[in-house]
Image (tube, helix red, strand yellow):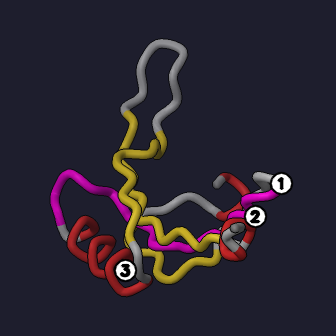
């Protein structure tokens, strides 16, 4: 017996935070990824991004979704649900 859903695309909802990276010898100041959380719904990811972006330690947060093709392992470009605070440009993602 086979599972027809085995090869169905999988949607992942992600909250990703950013923190300020301090400049140092040979290191430019900028943003770096802080934390990543995965959720089962868009609203959960968006709510977490809103909470994280409000914290003092967080420079900014994204909530986005990606679609994974289990048969090939390919992942789509992110589709942003919300971008809050200081976040990198999409081409830097």
x then y, percent, for residue 73: 76, 52
Sooner in the amino-acid sequence: mark 1 or mark 3: 3
x then y, percent, for residue 2: 71, 67
Question: Gap in Å between the C-alphas at discs 1 and 3?
Answer: 28 Å
From the viewer's perspective, tell me whether residue 19 is left or right of residue 56. Answer: right
- Dividing the picture into quadrants, the one containing residue 63 is bottom left
Q: Is mark 2 on a helix, strand or loop?
A: loop
Badge number at residue 5: none
- Dividing the picture into quadrants, the one containing residue 61 is bottom left
Q: Does the magenta stretch include residue 68?
A: yes
Q: Is mark 1 on a helix, strand or loop?
A: loop
Sooner in the amino-acid sequence: mark 3 or mark 2: 3
Which stretch is magenta? 55-71
Q: What element carries label 3?
A: helix
Q: Residue at x 38, y 69 (%)?
A: 39
Label 2 CA crowd tier, 10 Å (few <14, some 14–19, many 20+)? some
Callouts 1 and 3 close, C-beta under 8 Å: no
Q: Which residue is drawn at 42% across and 28% down?
A: 23
On the rendered image, what quadrant is the C terminus found in?
A: bottom right
x then y, percent, for residue 31: 46, 46
Q: Looking at the image, is 44 positioned above or below residue 91? A: below
Of tags 3 and 2, which is closer to the observer?
A: 2
Q: Which residue lies furthest to the bottom in this view?
A: 43
Badge number at residue 72: 1
x then y, percent, for residue 47: 28, 80
Callouts 2 and 1 close, C-beta under 8 Å: yes
Question: Gap in Å between the C-alphas at discs 3 and 2?
Answer: 23 Å
Question: According to the image, label 3 marks what residue?
Answer: 46
């Amino acid at each position: 017996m086979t599972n027809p859903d085995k090869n169905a695309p999988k949607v992942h909802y992600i909250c990703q935070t950013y923190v300020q990276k301090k400049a140092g010898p040979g290191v430019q100041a900028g943003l770096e990824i802080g934390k990543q959380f995965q959720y089962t719904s868009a609203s959960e990811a968006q709510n977490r991004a809103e909470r994280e972006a409000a914290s003092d330690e967080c420079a900014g947060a994204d909530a986005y979704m990606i679609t994974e093709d289990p048969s090939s392992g390919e992942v789509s470009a992110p589709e942003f649900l919300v971008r809050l605070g200081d976040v990198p440009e999409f081409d830097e993602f």
